[in-house]
Amino acid sequence: MVRLTRIYTRGGDQGETSLGDGKRVPKDDLRVAAYGTVDEANAAIGVARGHLSGNAADMLGRVQDDLFDLGADLCVPEDGAKGERAGKEPLRVTAAQVTRLEAEIDHMNESLEPLDSFILPGGTPGGAHLHLARTVVRRAERLMVRLARAGDAAVNQHALDYINRLSDHLFVLARQVNDAEGSDILWRPGANR
């Protein structure tokens, strides 16, 4: 468990921060941008979760825990100091977390009609917030892919799989939430010409 006794350290006042392996990097480093955007996605999911209850809120609670795992994974480069700081192995996203998302997607999708059109982001407040969270997750994914493609910045493949699956999960969950009230909004191509 993490224990925080001080919230500010003044260590970042000069525009640098520490990664999980202790390495100092600029705050605008691509790795920091990636896990910062994962944190932003987690906050957006928290807002969506506030509009939901039951199984949907429970699934999002598990996702929020996973996103903290993902942030911890990203803040310790795979090819870096191995996160052995304080004698601990780094926390990594696992295949089991990806498999759980896939199972939840499949289960939710069973009750939904196939799509004949793209869906506009919106619908119920919960559905709209899920769509917004989905777009933040996609931005995090783009940053993670960019980081993985950087020559010296290895990224856990399961982390990449997880973030890709998560946007699908949020999309299907938004559909399920909106379907309960019949409020998915379909795109009408060229409707306003």
Image: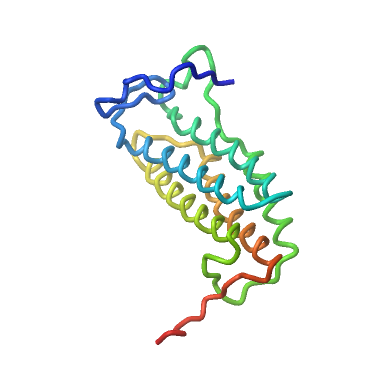
Is 139 placed left or right of 87 in the picture?
A: left
Q: Residue 39 location, x and y as percent? A: 47, 39
Q: Residue 170 location, x and y as percent? A: 59, 54
Task: Tell which of 153 and 55 is nearer to you.
Answer: 55
Q: Relative to 143, is 135 above or below?
A: below
Could you say which quadrant of the image residue 21 lies in?
Answer: top left
Q: How is the image coloured?
A: rainbow
Total marks placed? 0
Q: Residue 37 location, x and y as percent? A: 43, 43
Is 122 placed left or right of 108 in the picture?
A: left
Taking the spot 34% from the left edge, 39% from the top edge, the residue there is 30
Taking the spot 44% from the left edge, 24% from the top edge, the residue there is 20
Location of the C terminus (image quadrant): bottom left
Task: Tell which of 30 and 50 is nearer to you.
Answer: 50
Q: Residue 128 location, x and y as percent? A: 55, 60
Task: Tell which of 129 and 96 is nearer to you.
Answer: 129
Location of the N terminus (image quadrant): top right
Q: Relative to 65, is 111 above or below?
A: below
Q: Decide if residue 98 is in sight here.
A: yes
Could you say which quadrant of the image residue 66 lies in?
Answer: top right
Taking the spot 55% from the left edge, 40% from the top edge, the residue there is 158
Taking the spot 69% from the left edge, 67% from the top edge, the residue there is 181
Q: Decide if residue 103 is in sight here.
A: no
